[in-house]
Image: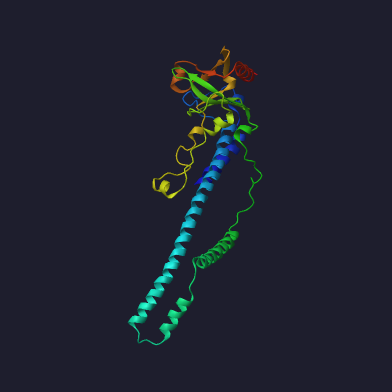
């Protein structure tokens, strides 16, 4: 299931590279008012793919740690079992000797052989490890026969989404929409003229927080794949695992106007062409979002880059 998720994300990313930007499409195209969060921005798809791969690798490491612990426990149990089995065999042979004392002397030979082969726990551990090594060797030989072909994406560099060439600017700001309170967001402007806002609910994130640290707060929570979580039905890549990676607000800059409100805030106004039944009421609607920055220089920088 994890491989399917990653393969699907990668396929979507590759397809999005050839998908035309809505800003560059014909004038007759429209934007659905009911789905403002839906975005085909290549950076968002690339970011979700990169996080999915990193998330998978981290989940794999956690799962490998749990399997290592489980393997160590099973190995200790096997050593203990063999130690106890030897004691049981000696006691059994002694009891059989007492019960069947009239049997030929072969019984004595068996008992002498068992007693003479007294082994320490270290020697038994070596015997168990030798069997494990033989099975690992056989497994590697079988796996070699099933080796996959050359990976077409072996040279792909999985760097941070914030270092992508598709990203123009990223900064932690505060956002306010009509009828709502101020909330801390990671604001992102992409090379394809999109303006995304990712709401961050962590109290540890402020406007002074770096974008790299703020982005880590959007990462999905990793569930350690141990026995307890499996019994509770908790797994990674479950339904809605990537919801924090979907922008809370997405604006198309070619349809937006930026207006300064004061030294540390400005307003983004997006014109949305209505479709469906609402188009009979009015031809278009507007969506306004107030943005607050930490300093006047940050506001100047945002207005300059948004209106360039």
Reply above or below: 164 against 60: above
**In x, y percent, where is residue 266?**
56, 15
Reply above or below: 172 against 3: above
Reply above or below: 197 against 144: above
Residue 73 visible here = yes
Q: Nearer the viewer, residue 264 or 235?
A: 264
**In x, y percent, where is residue 176?**
49, 19
In the shown orientation, is residue 69 left or right of residue 145?
left
Colouring style = rainbow
Tally of numbered discs? 0
Residue furthest to the left in view is 99
Query: For the C terminus, which image quadrant?
Result: top right
The image quadrant of residue 93 is: bottom left
Reply above or below: 127 against 94: above
The image quadrant of residue 130 is: bottom right
Q: Nearer the viewer, residue 155 or 140?
A: 140
Residue furthest to the top in view is 262
Q: Residue at x 42, y 50 (%)?
A: 227
**In x, y percent, where is residue 80?**
44, 64
**In x, y percent, where is residue 135?**
54, 64
Residue 270 visible here = no
The image quadrant of residue 172 is: top right
Q: Nearer the viewer, residue 87 or 70?
A: 87
């Amino acid at each position: 299931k994890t491989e399917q998720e990653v393969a699907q994300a990668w396929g979507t990313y590759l397809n999005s590279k050839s998908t035309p930007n809505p800003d560059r499409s014909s004038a007759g195209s429209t934007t659905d008012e009911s789905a403002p969060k839906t975005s085909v921005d290549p950076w968002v798809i690339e970011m979700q793919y990169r996080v999915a791969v990193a998330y998978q690798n981290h989940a794999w490491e956690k799962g490998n740690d749990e399997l290592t612990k489980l393997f160590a426990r099973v190995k200790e149990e096997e050593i203990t079992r063999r130690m106890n089995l030897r004691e049981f065999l000696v006691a059994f042979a002694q009891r059989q000797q007492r019960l069947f004392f009239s049997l030929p002397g072969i019984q004595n030979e068996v008992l002498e052989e068992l007693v003479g082969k007294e082994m320490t726990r270290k020697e038994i551990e070596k015997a168990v490890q030798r069997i494990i090594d033989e099975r690992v060797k056989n497994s590697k030989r079988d796996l070699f026969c099933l080796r996959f072909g050359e990976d077409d994406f072996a040279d792909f560099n999985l760097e941070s989404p914030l270092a992508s060439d598709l990203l123009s600017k990223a900064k932690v700001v505060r956002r306010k929409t009509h009828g709502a309170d101020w909330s801390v967001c990671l604001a992102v402007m992409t090379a394809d003229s999109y303006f995304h806002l990712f709401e961050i609910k962590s109290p540890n994130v402020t406007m002074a927080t770096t974008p790299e640290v703020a982005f880590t707060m959007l990462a999905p929570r990793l569930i350690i794949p141990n026995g307890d979580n499996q019994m509770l039905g908790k797994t990674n890549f479950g339904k809605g695992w990537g919801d924090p990676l979907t922008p809370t607000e997405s604006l198309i800059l070619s349809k937006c106007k930026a207006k300064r409100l004061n030294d540390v805030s400005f307003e983004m106004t997006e014109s949305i062409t209505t479709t469906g039944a609402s188009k009979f009421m009015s031809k278009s609607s507007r969506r306004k979002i107030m943005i607050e920055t930490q300093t006047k220089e940050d506001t100047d920088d945002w207005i300059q880059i948004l209106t360039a």
